[in-house]
């Protein structure tokens, strides 16, 4: 089987998930050609697992001060180039296209009638999970951005739906034996400005914060330790921290839950997926959320030691087996098998 695997490069979570899938497929000697879009090629890093991958411009949403800016997204997107890339992509040489919410491969597969399997968090939203309804445009974009014939949605809980556990491996990460209040707090709010983050967190000294930000200069200012994104340093700080403050993306929250860290999320304004993730965390009772950078919410969260730990199975290995079996099995059977192997804490559902 020859597989074309599309990766949405906008967020690090998509790439992290794809790395796990690349390893799982490689262990089965699969023949895979990867394609990445949605981020300038020069901004991609640690891409060795994808070999000689293809790159296309694709589409990405623009944000400013923690909010999606639709007008800027439309102005800076290149719909003509996207259409050309979709039509020019040669897909008939492949038996299956796997898309992690990547539009070029998804739409090229639809046009050429090559089967498309959608694997990712966004595909869970076709099911009756906790979610913010959003506008008609929001629902249309979510549904049509990267369409697939077969959808394997991922989420933190099954919500009695045929969706799968996360693909967010944390094996091999050792958690230091310290009380949570003695450890620094890990912060990842890449869509917020450094000034706003500083104003929010500096008053909480002597509590230390390790802050990863794309505009950070590697330096410590009082209780704020700013760091640039790092695939090696970030997991180490995640393991050592006493809790995580982050946007409401899916992958980092999945890792945080598996490590048993407390979590406070701030969804990206105007982003229905992140608002829905914050709602789901609150619905499960596994984390807290704030809609703005709220000092009172941070203070209350810092005072609390409440955290849950979730044990998810090796979803990537089972999905790789499903894919290489021609994706002919039952999605419901795959979901049941994986959730039966998971250990979930009590929920407020």
Image: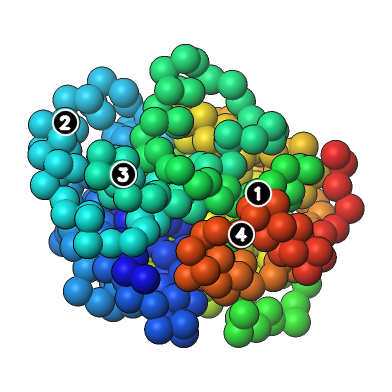
Q: Earlier in the sequence, mark 3 or mark 2?
A: 2
Tell me: 222 left or right of 158. left
In percent of the image, x 38 and y 50: which residue is there? 115
The image quadrant that residue 161 belongs to is top right
Q: Which residue is mark 3?
A: 113
For the residues marked 4 and 3, what is the alpha-carbon distance in whole angstroms? Answer: 20 Å
Does residue 23 appear in this view? Answer: no
Query: How many angstroms separate mark 1 from mark 4 (CA)?
Result: 14 Å
Q: Residue at x 36, y 35 (%)?
A: 145
Tag 2's secondary structure?
Answer: helix
Q: Quadrant of residue 97?
A: bottom left
Q: Which residue is mark 4?
A: 329
Q: Is residue 247 above or below residue 33?
A: above
The residue under label 1 is: 163
Is 251 situated above or below 106? Answer: below
Residue at the spot of label 2: 79
In the image, residue 303 lies at what x, y percent? 78, 50
Circle nearer the N terminus (1, 2): 2
Q: Alpha-carbon neighbours of circle 3 within 10 Å: few (<14), some, or many (≥20)? A: few
Q: Residue at x 78, y 69 (%)?
A: 341
Asked if the residues shown at circle 3 and circle 2 are in contact, with their CB atoms under 8 angstroms apart, the answer is no
């Amino acid at each position: 089987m020859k597989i074309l695997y599309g990766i949405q490069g906008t967020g690090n979570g998509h790439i992290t998930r794809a790395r796990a899938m690349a390893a799982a497929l490689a262990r089965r000697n699969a023949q895979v050609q990867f394609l990445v879009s949605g981020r300038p090629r020069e901004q991609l890093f640690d891409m060795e697992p994808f070999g000689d991958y293809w790159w296309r411009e694709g589409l990405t949403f623009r944000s400013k001060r923690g909010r999606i800016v639709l007008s800027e997204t439309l102005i800076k997107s290149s719909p003509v180039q996207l259409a050309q890339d979709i039509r020019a992509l040669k897909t008939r040489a492949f038996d299956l296209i796997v898309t992690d919410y990547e539009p070029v491969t998804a739409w090229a597969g639809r046009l050429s009638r090559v089967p498309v399997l959608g694997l990712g968090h966004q595909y869970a939203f076709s099911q009756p999970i906790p979610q913010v309804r959003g506008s008609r445009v929001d629902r249309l974009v979510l549904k049509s951005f990267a369409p697939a014939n077969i959808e394997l949605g991922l989420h933190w809980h099954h919500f009695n739906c045929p969706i799968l556990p996360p693909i967010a491996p944390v094996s091999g990460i050792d958690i230091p034996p310290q009380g949570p209040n003695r450890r620094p707090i890990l912060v990842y709010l890449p869509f917020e400005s450094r000034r706003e983050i500083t104003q929010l967190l500096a008053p909480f000294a002597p509590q230390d914060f390790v802050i990863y930000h794309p505009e950070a200069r590697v330096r410590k200012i009082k209780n704020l330790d700013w760091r640039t994104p790092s695939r090696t340093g970030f997991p180490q700080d995640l393991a050592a921290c006493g809790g995580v403050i982050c946007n409401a993306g899916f992958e980092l929250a999945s890792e945080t839950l598996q490590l048993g860290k407390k979590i406070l999320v701030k969804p990206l304004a105007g982003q229905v997926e992140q608002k829905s993730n914050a709602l789901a965390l609150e619905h499960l009772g596994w984390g807290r959320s704030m809609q703005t950078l709220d000092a009172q919410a941070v203070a209350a969260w810092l005072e609390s030691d409440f955290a849950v730990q979730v044990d998810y199975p090796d979803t990537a290995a089972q999905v790789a087996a499903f894919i290489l079996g021609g994706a002919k099995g039952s999605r419901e059977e795959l979901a049941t098998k994986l959730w039966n192997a998971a250990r979930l804490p009590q929920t407020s559902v």
